[in-house]
Amino acid sequence: MKKWNLLVLTGMLGLFLTGCSYSNSQTDSTNTPSDAKTTPQKLNVGITAELTTADVSLAMDDVVTSVMRQVTEGLYGFDETGGAVPALAQEVVEPTDDGLTYTVKLKEGVKWSNGDPITAHDFEYSWKRTVDPATASPQAYYFEGIANYSEIASGDKKPDELGVKALNDQTLEVHLAYPMSYFPQMMAVVAFYPLNEAFVEEKGDAYGTTSEDTLYNGPYVLKDWNGSNMSWNYEKNPEYWDADNVAIPNVNVQVIKENVTGKNLFDTGELDVVKISGDLVANEQNNEALQIRSLPGTYFLKMNTQNDILGNTDVRKAIALSFDSESLANNVLNDGAKKSIGFVPTGFPNPETGKDFTEEIGDINPYDPDQAKELWEKAKTDLGVNEAKLEVLCSDTESAKKLSEFVQGSVSSTLDGMEVTVAAVPFNNRLERSRGGDFDMVVGGWTPVYADPVDFLNLLQTGNNGNDGKWTNEKYDQLIEDAHLTYANDVNKRWEAM
């Protein structure tokens, strides 16, 4: 992993200032509002980046998945501990056939926002569309454990041969290639949400590009999004099966990229919820409006191995060793984030021993500028160069720019002849360039989709859609395959392989 990923910090925090002027009622997906007499008003929310798509097959980044969870829904959702709970499904089912077959029944009477019934066929269509190479879904690899996915991805089988079938309108049957104890959690992931075939086919390439070209089945419908604007609305979906428990009928969303701007809008009452970071967090510690949510995530730097300089292993190692993640977390970000000791963050205990994954591995993210210099000098000789120019690509948000500028300063000052510049671009552009391989290094991050270390480790496999740097290692790929297949039914050996 260290060969291409520069590990920055872990324990990502969601830090929010939340005002309560919009309503005194509290609600969740299972309970009615505690104060039914209170009439909820609009909620005004600030988020950090623009929405890139409303197509569940193309969703990947945190913003898209967050929006999709407001306006769409799958068979299952997540509880507070990350476990699967019923959403459109009647119940969380146990697998049969030695863990290889799941048969899930849908709730009666669930509908799309246009009034069409939601059926098992909508799930079959959606999943097969997502794994179709022609869709180019960045989430397709989530289906790897389903029967025939690997052959579909390689072109040896057709998408229609994926191991999922609607037995009737209410019953979906799924066949796995190997047992996955976390598969119910995966079915709560946005990639596994349904799609209305008639609507999607009618819209064609336009599907998911604007609010009007998208169909919904969640608690809200998306409004006033033209595909590129920096604000939109959620309106309560009257067709939602649990609409009685949706307490807030309207939500206004605005993209706010600068900390101070968001804080000012919060102070003036124009925003009810806004995410903050950096020094503002320290300054607001005594503010009762501050809500802190700890997330097991990792910020990291992807290095493009197709680059003439970064194709050299010693160069990548030199960069990885040249800056102090602990200093970055404590002195630059200063918002409660912590140094990462590995690509997988803290928060994944071994189900047999109870020990955290990171505890068993130890610190594999050292800071060693002396060794970094030695490796860089060796690499310069091997490459026949005296200097190199590299660019760090990042989103144009305040925290992303801080991360990138720290990398820039640390690497440039440690490695003689290495000039690093920063290119801060809009979020959409950063994603497009990253996926197209149009970068030297790029700042990214990952929070878990399901509660298993392999959700992070999969990202580094050869050919994985998240492996933008095109790093490849046969031994690594074999160990991941062992974790998925060879040791699928042996917890200890699977954990050892990971």
Image (tube, rainbow, N blue to C red):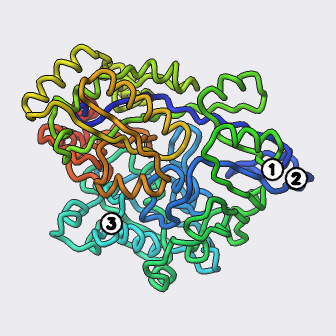
Residue position for label 2: 36
Amino acid type shown at disc 3: Ala
Give the answer, above or below, for where 148 lies relative to 328: below
Task: Indicate the position of residue 285 as horizontal and vertical percent values.
Answer: 71, 23
* Element type at mark 2: loop
Name the image quarter holding residue 454: top left
Side of 305 where 413 appears, left or right: right
* Element type at mark 1: loop
Amino acid type shown at disc 2: Ala
Residue position for label 3: 136
Label 1 Cα neighbours within 10 Å, binned few <14 / some 14-19 / many ≥20:
some
Give the answer, above or below, for where 407 lies relative to 35: above
Could you tell me which residue is drawn at 49 percent across and 39 percent down? 400
Q: Is residue 343 visible?
A: yes
Side of 464 where 421 appears, left or right: right
Compute the Cα span from label 3 to label 1. 41 Å
Amino acid type shown at disc 1: Pro
Task: Indicate the position of residue 341 as horizontal and vertical percent values.
Answer: 36, 22
Of 263 and 253, nearer the camera is: 263
CB-based contact (under 8 Å), mark 1 and mark 2: yes
Residue position for label 1: 33
If the image is split into quadrants, where does the C terminus sit?
top left
